[in-house]
Amino acid sequence: SEKTLLITGASSGIGAATARQAIANGWTVGLFARSEDKLNALVDELGDKAIALPGDVTDFESVTAAMDKFADHAGGINAVYANAGTGLSAAGTDAGDPEEWERMIKVNVMGVLWTVKAAMPYLKKSTGHLLLTGSAAGRRHIAGSVYGASKWFVHGYGGNLSEEMKSFGGRCTVIAPGMVDTPFFDEPKPDKLQPEDIADAVMHALEANPRCAVNEIFLMPTQ
Ligand code: NJP
């Protein structure tokens, strides 16, 4: 198939919504996250075009193994969505916990680097597409947002990756959402963006005419 997509952080929220939409649009989808039970439930829902790839983005070996397994299963990889990410219990620098920062940086920074590193040989072969989940907090300055700083990394790297991908005809898209109603938050956010809104944006970038690289999409809730 020419439409094979591996998604990290696929077990809930934006990643799971994107998997649903991609399957509906005829993609074969690799679902990567730590929660094997949730991935298996999603495969039950989505059918045999989806495959569960349990793993942890903070473990490079685990990411490369999943990439290899998916490529074998699907006959190559056309797109990789580095979406796994995590937040912090306290936003500010003063109240922040340095050990929690380190865990977050491992996921939001190293996890993205390692996902891209593992994906690159396959995407070079397929002239493929890389997508990253950044954040509105990686585009605007928010007081004390250590989380936001990790997302500025994603936007900076994504800009450079657009050039790197272009060098072999590939594409890179960074998605920058404002607040989305997902398990990222403890409380429901019914007035905010819904995960399907982000999935729509991802599909737009993925299915744009090959001459068109959608480098960035910034979405904000109206409320
Ligand atoms: O949140 P959630 P979202 N290895 O918690 C996975 C960004 N964002 O959909 O491993 C592998 O439902 C985790 O799976 P599991 C945000 O920063 C959000 O909102 O099983 N996977 C789950 O599938 C993040 O980059 C908002 O626990 C790991 C997924 O990541 C992305 O959107 C606003 C992992 C998180 O899903 C998706 O988050 C914004 C690991 N070590 C940006 N650690 C927002 N919600 O408002 C976590 O601007 N995961």
Image (cartoon, rainbow, N blue to C red):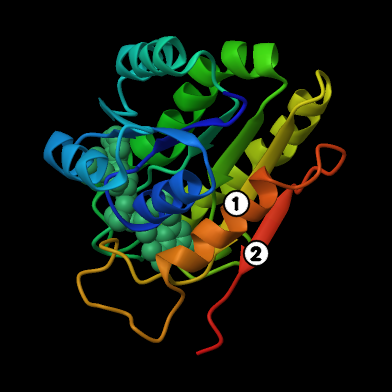
> For this rendering, which residue is in front, 205 or 133?
205
Give the quadrant of residue 54.
top left
Residue at image coords 52%, 41% = 26
Mark 1 Cα within 10 Å, few/some/many (few <14, many 20+)? some
In this view, the residue farthest toward the bottom is 223
Give the quadrant of residue 168.
top right
Q: In the image, is the residue at mark 1 within 8 Å of ligand 1 by its beta carbon?
A: no
Q: Position of residue 20 (x, y in %)?
A: 40, 51
Q: Secondary structure at mark 1?
A: helix
The mark nearer the N terminus, 1 or 2, is 1
Q: Amino acid at mark 1?
A: Met
Labelled disc at residue 218: 2
Q: Position of residue 222 (x, y in %)?
A: 56, 87
Give the quadrant of residue 139.
bottom right
Residue 218 seen from this side: yes
Check the image and report above or below for 97 versus 178: above
Residue 153 seen from this side: no
- Dot 1 corresponds to which residue? 203
- Of circles 1 and 2, the one toward us is 1
Residue at image coords 51%, 67% = 197
> For this rendering, which residue is in front, 35 or 134?
35
Q: Amino acid at mark 2?
A: Phe
Check the image and report above or below for 127 versus 205: above
Residue at image coords 41%, 46% = 19
In this view, the residue farthest toward the right is 211
Q: Horizontally, is 116 left or right of 167 in the view?
A: left
Question: What is the distance, in whole Å, between disc 1 and disc 2 at their CAs?
Answer: 14 Å
Q: Position of residue 212 (x, y in %)?
A: 84, 44
